[in-house]
């Protein structure tokens, strides 16, 4: 049976990837640093490896006898020190790549991140439009550098995906942020509420990673991945919030002044080395919901045969059931 090592296996994305590969008949080695979380994944077709890919010895050993590696693990935070992002995302990816080379792994599939021009809208953002000079936050910078680690070599076969707006059961960022801001000032509407957002159900990201591993066409290629269902942000909230038994409320805000405020706040936090907790809003947060950034997934459809298997409506329904079960207060 083909062996596939998955880093970050117990994270939001990692769990979906483990399921996708097991359901597709592969034997998975779930790699991560938390023994308790790894133990929850163990099954007949899932072995575990306790380690840290920032430690070259750990990932070298984990890749022994492995056919493919899916690198989902990342240092993912809204705010933090630059050196931590570089260590986790750039140096860590280099370690994974070197381990693949050492062990003659057939292909490394890397989960990267989109990088747009934060001050421009786009209705058809293609892979070649990738902004390598994006400095909007340390996470995006580190992912750009991690991609370069792979793209500047040819000894390790690789494929890269750039998923946008990951959401689904287990999401701790996208939908929870909208819920929390709705409780306070209301969901911000910029540019007279005309902003269009492009999301991706987590199951579809996992599917894309598998297709990148399996398809010859994906070798040394990069793909945008979304659900292919761009929505006006207000329409999206009107569909999603009632399923959570939440009444959406809105707050119209000017993009320019808020962007300037976020930039100033970030500068102050960096000046005084405040990293444990970030500003109330960052430029990255703002651009996620304040700019129209729609991604062209035609290359993935054409070369990978990628067709999203979970629609946004289905994702919202599943998320709502989980939310009501695990997050709403129990009736007395």
Image (cartoon, grey):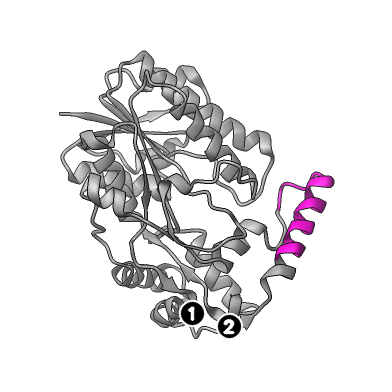
Crowding near the residue tagged with mark 1, few <14, some 14–19, many ≥20 C-alpha atoms within 10 Å? many
Q: Residue 262: within the magenta? A: yes
134 or 183: nearer the viewer? 134
Q: Position of residue 206 (x, y in %)?
A: 31, 48
284 or 115: nearer the viewer? 115
Residue 211 shown left or right of residue 271 in the figure? left
Q: Quadrant of residue 106?
A: top left
Mark 2 lies on residue: 250
* Range of residues picked out in magenta: 259-277
Q: Quadrant of residue 241?
A: bottom left
137 or 67: nearer the viewer? 137
Kindly check if marks 1 and 2 are in contact, taking CB atoms under 8 A apart as contact: yes
Q: Residue 79: within the magenta? A: no
Numbered disc 1: secondary structure:
helix
Residue 306 shown left or right of residue 157 in the figure? left
Q: Position of residue 34 (x, y in %)?
A: 46, 37
Identify which residue is drawn at 39% across, 48% down.
13
Mark 1 lies on residue: 234
Identify which residue is drawn at 43% across, 76% down.
236
Identify which residue is drawn at 27% across, 62% down.
310
Numbered disc 2: secondary structure:
strand
């Amino acid at each position: 049976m083909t062996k596939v090592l998955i880093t970050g296996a117990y994270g939001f994305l990692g769990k979906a990837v483990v399921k996708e590969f097991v359901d597709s008949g592969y034997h998975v080695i779930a790699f991560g640093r938390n023994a308790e979380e790894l133990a929850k994944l163990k099954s007949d077709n899932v072995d575990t490896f306790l380690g840290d890919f920032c430690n070259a010895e750990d990932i070298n050993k984990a890749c022994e006898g492995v056919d493919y590696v899916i690198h989902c693990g990342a240092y993912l935070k809204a705010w933090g020190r630059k050196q931590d992002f570089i260590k986790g995302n750039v140096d860590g990816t280099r370690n994974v790549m070197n381990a693949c080379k050492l062990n003659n792994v057939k292909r490394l599939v890397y989960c990267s991140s989109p990088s747009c021009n934060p001050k421009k809208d786009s209705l058809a953002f293609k892979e070649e439009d990738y902004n390598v000079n994006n400095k909007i936050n340390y996470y995006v910078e580190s992912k750009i550098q991690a991609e370069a680690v792979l793209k500047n070599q040819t000894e390790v076969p690789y494929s890269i995906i750039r998923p946008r707006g990951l959401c689904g059961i287990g999401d701790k960022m996208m939908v929870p942020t909208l819920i929390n801001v709705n409780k306070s000032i209301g969901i911000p509407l910029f540019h007279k509420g005309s902003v269009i957002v492009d999301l991706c159900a987590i199951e579809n990201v996992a599917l894309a990673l598998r297709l990148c591993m399996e398809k010859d066409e994906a070798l040394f290629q990069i793909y945008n991945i979304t659900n292919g269902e761009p929505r006006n942000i207000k329409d999206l909230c009107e569909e999603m919030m009632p399923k959570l038994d939440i009444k959406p409320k809105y707050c119209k805000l000017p993009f320019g002044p808020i962007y300037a405020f976020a930039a100033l706040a970030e500068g102050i936090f960096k000046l005084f080395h405040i990293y444990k907790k970030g500003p109330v809003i960052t430029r990255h947060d703002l651009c996620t919901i304040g700019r129209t950034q729609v991604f062209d997934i035609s290359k993935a459809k054409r070369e990978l045969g990628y067709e999203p298997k979970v629609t946004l409506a289905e994702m919202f329904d599943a998320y709502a059931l989980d939310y009501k079960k695990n997050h709403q207060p129990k009736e007395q």
